Image (cartoon, helix red, strand yellow):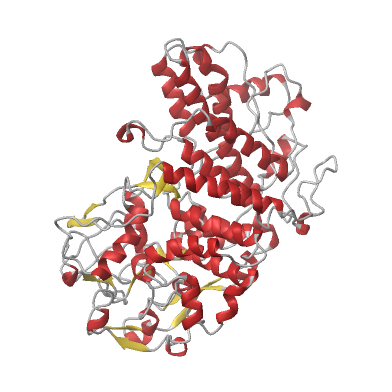
């Protein structure tokens, strides 16, 4: 019997109500615990158990970032397959919350249980007889980090939470078990302190990446600590007057309402340290390495591969941390068409081809000059919905002689690397000559278009970025993905967070901010920020103000981190969600077969974001069990 079930059974026999789901009461002398730490091999199994509570970030059903904001969408007939879609459509609830990290359930892990398992490990690892002290310390450091990270995931989703420093003995009174939610500042401090405890006992590199890929290292800890501090400094948590009345049952305020600029300085310093440590460990921005098969590709395709591979190429130097247990094969089948070409009538696995991208995110990508489409004075903004034929100049992006929307022309390389669109090229799939790349035919009745009820991209786009370039169909009904583990932390993520933090610290834009933005932009194949806004923008003075540069940084981050699950959380911590997520979800009219009909903008859903949606609700049952808990505002 699992530890949680055993503990709940004990309490149900002794009292008329059960203990809180997030605090396990651990009795002394459980034989199974003794056997779990009587030798190194058994302790390692328990270590793996602590890792096993990481949510499945590559799971289309378990990561709210895929469908919970405005980047991806699917037909309503797919609601049962995408919990994030239910959240974005306003169906989150208190009876049976979707994607409940608090209580666990379908497609999610119970993070309180995971924290309790971490506590058990930390209490017993010193007893293992056949381990060196240094190795015990290293394993304990890994688990301290996981424990801190699980607290952070709960904090990010629910706001103020209880802190589970150690498991409570079975002799604890009911009042001791009924703990309170802690103020967000205290939770952040606890997470940071626990991560700092872990830092000194972790290696700079893994000894054997083949066997240990995904294990916690020193660069991972300092990087995630810096990211946590960035959240603590962000508007949602730093001096937020919207939660002035949010108190616990004792009247204690759970949010600070006074802005503290020092939080941004602390975040900026931590991010610079994390970047320096990452560099010391050999991490650098990814650039595609040509192989004998790809050595003749064009510079255009090479740049696209720089961008695609930064996320999907396993073992690449840009990635600091992956979830080695969360592979992307199933996801890739969902985010690519079920049929790719006239000569291949193949099918991806059951349910495949349903996860499309939106016009909302397509509009976010820059022009070729590195500017928003409505700010580039040289781009055809007013004619963006006109029809246009691909020419020789665009042959590596758009099929020559085929008709598509003007919106798809003269865009930045990340647009073409991240999105599959009608008549757009899709490099790879076993074809290495980029003059012979497949192109998508996505209108109704066509090979990559709507031919079944829900197995098509409802908005007319696919998130190509998530598909490794060698993933392919190999035979009718045979789908062969090139699997890669889900990246949790990338170096470009840190660069952009550092630029964001510096912009909040400094009185006006500095060369250091532009430097780290431009490192990302250079890899993306677009001009630097200053050059782009000076020579091509309708508003060249935008880069001279803190507010203007903040908007630029947030846009840059949305583009660079597209489809990685970050935007769902970013628009919340920035408090821009009411602006960004109260717009219709839009796409092309994928039900139409003629280009004149297909290329009409269609509202897919009238999305609404309200104040309560910043944080998820706690299930009503948990509030009944622990009467010291208070519900999140609005729920």
Going by the image, does 457 lie left or right of 89?
Answer: left
Going by the image, does 339 lie left or right of 104?
Answer: left
Going by the image, does 243 lie left or right of 57?
Answer: right
Nearest the eye: 211 or 317:
317
Q: Quadrant of residue 344?
A: bottom left
Q: Measured along the vertical axis of the image, is residue 286 above or below residue 152?
A: below
The furthest residue to the right: 251
Q: Measured along the vertical axis of the image, is residue 198 above or below residue 60?
A: above
Residue 181 lies, in percent from the top left, at 73, 39
Q: Measured along the vertical axis of the image, is residue 592 above or below residue 224?
A: below
Q: Quadrant of residue 74?
A: bottom left
Nearest the eye: 83 or 356:
356
User: Is residue 426 in sight in this rendering?
Assistant: no
Residue 601 lies, in percent from the top left, at 45, 81
User: Is residue 32 in sight in this rendering?
Assistant: yes
The residue shown at (77%, 46%) is: 254
The furthest residue to the front: 511
Going by the image, does 185 lie left or right of 279?
Answer: right
The residue shown at (65%, 31%) is: 164
Residue 88 lies, in percent from the top left, at 56, 61
The residue shown at (59%, 34%) is: 196
- The image shows a total of numbered marks equal to 0
Residue 544 lies, in percent from the top left, at 60, 74
The residue shown at (47%, 40%) is: 219
């Amino acid at each position: 019997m699992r530890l949680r079930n055993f503990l709940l059974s004990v309490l149900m026999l002794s009292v008329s109500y059960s203990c809180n789901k997030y605090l396990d009461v651990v009795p002394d002398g459980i034989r199974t615990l003794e056997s779990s730490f009587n030798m190194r091999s058994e302790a390692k199994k328990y270590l793996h158990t602590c890792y096993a509570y990481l949510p499945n970030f590559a799971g289309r059903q378990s990561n709210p970032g895929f469908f919970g904001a405005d980047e991806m969408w699917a037909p309503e007939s797919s609601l049962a397959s995408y919990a994030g879609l239910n959240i974005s459509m306003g169906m989150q609830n208190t009876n049976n919350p979707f994607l409940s990290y608090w209580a666990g359930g379908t497609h999610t892990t119970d993070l309180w249980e995971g924290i309790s398992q971490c506590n058990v490990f930390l209490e017993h690892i010193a007893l293992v007889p056949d381990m060196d002290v240094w190795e015990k310390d290293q394993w304990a450091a890994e688990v301290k980090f996981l424990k801190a990270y699980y607290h952070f995931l709960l904090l990010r989703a629910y706001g103020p939470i209880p802190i589970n420093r150690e498991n409570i003995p079975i002799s604890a009174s009911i009042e001791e078990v009924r703990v309170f939610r802690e103020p967000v500042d205290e939770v952040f401090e606890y997470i940071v302190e626990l991560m700092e405890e872990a830092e000194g006992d972790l290696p700079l590199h893994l000894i054997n990446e083949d066997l240990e890929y995904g294990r916690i290292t020193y660069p991972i800890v300092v990087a995630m600590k810096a990211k946590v501090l960035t959240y603590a400094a962000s508007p949602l948590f730093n001096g937020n007057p919207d939660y002035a009345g949010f108190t616990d049952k004792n009247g204690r305020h759970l949010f600070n309402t006074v802005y503290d600029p020092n939080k941004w300085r602390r975040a900026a310093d931590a991010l610079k340290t994390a970047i320096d440590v990452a560099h010391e460990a050999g991490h650098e921005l990814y650039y595609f390495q040509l192989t004998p098969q790809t050595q003749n590709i064009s510079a255009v395709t090479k740049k696209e591969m720089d961008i695609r591979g930064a996320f999907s190429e396993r073992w690449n130097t840009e990635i600091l941390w992956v979830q080695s247990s969360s592979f992307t094969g199933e996801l890739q089948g969902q985010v690519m068409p079920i049929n790719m070409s006239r000569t291949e009538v193949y099918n991806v696995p059951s349910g495949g081809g349903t996860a499309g991208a939106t016009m909302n995110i397509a509009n976010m990508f820059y022009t070729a000059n590195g500017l928003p489409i409505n700010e580039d004075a040289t781009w055809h903004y007013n004619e963006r919905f006109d029809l246009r034929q691909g020419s020789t100049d665009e042959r590596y992006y758009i099929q020559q002689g085929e008709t598509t929307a003007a919106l798809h022309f003269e865009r930045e390389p990340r647009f073409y690397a991240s999105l599959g669109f009608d008549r757009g090229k899709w490099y790879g799939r076993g074809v290495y000559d980029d003059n012979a790349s497949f192109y998508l035919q996505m209108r109704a009745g066509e090979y990559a278009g709507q031919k079944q009820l829900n197995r098509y991209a409802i908005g007319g786009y696919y998130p190509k970025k998530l598909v490794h370039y060698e993933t392919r169909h190999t035979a009718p009904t045979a789908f062969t993905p090139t699997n890669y583990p889900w990246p949790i932390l990338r170096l470009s993520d840190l660069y952009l967070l550092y630029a964001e933090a510096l912009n909040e610290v400094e009185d006006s834009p500095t060369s250091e901010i532009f430097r780290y933005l431009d490192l990302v932009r250079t890899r993306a194949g677009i001009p630097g920020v200053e050059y782009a806004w000076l020579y091509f923008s309708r508003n060249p003075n935008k880069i001279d103000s803190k507010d203007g540069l903040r908007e630029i940084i947030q846009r840059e981050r949305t583009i660079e981190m597209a489809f990685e699950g970050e935007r769902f959380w970013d628009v919340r911590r920035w408090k821009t969600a009411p602006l960004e997520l109260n717009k219709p979800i839009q796409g092309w009219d994928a039900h139409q077969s003629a280009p004149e009909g297909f290329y009409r903008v269609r509202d897919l859903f009238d999305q609404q974001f309200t104040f309560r949606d910043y944080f998820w609700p706690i299930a009503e049952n948990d509030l009944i069990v622990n009467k010291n808990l208070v519900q999140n505002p609005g729920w």
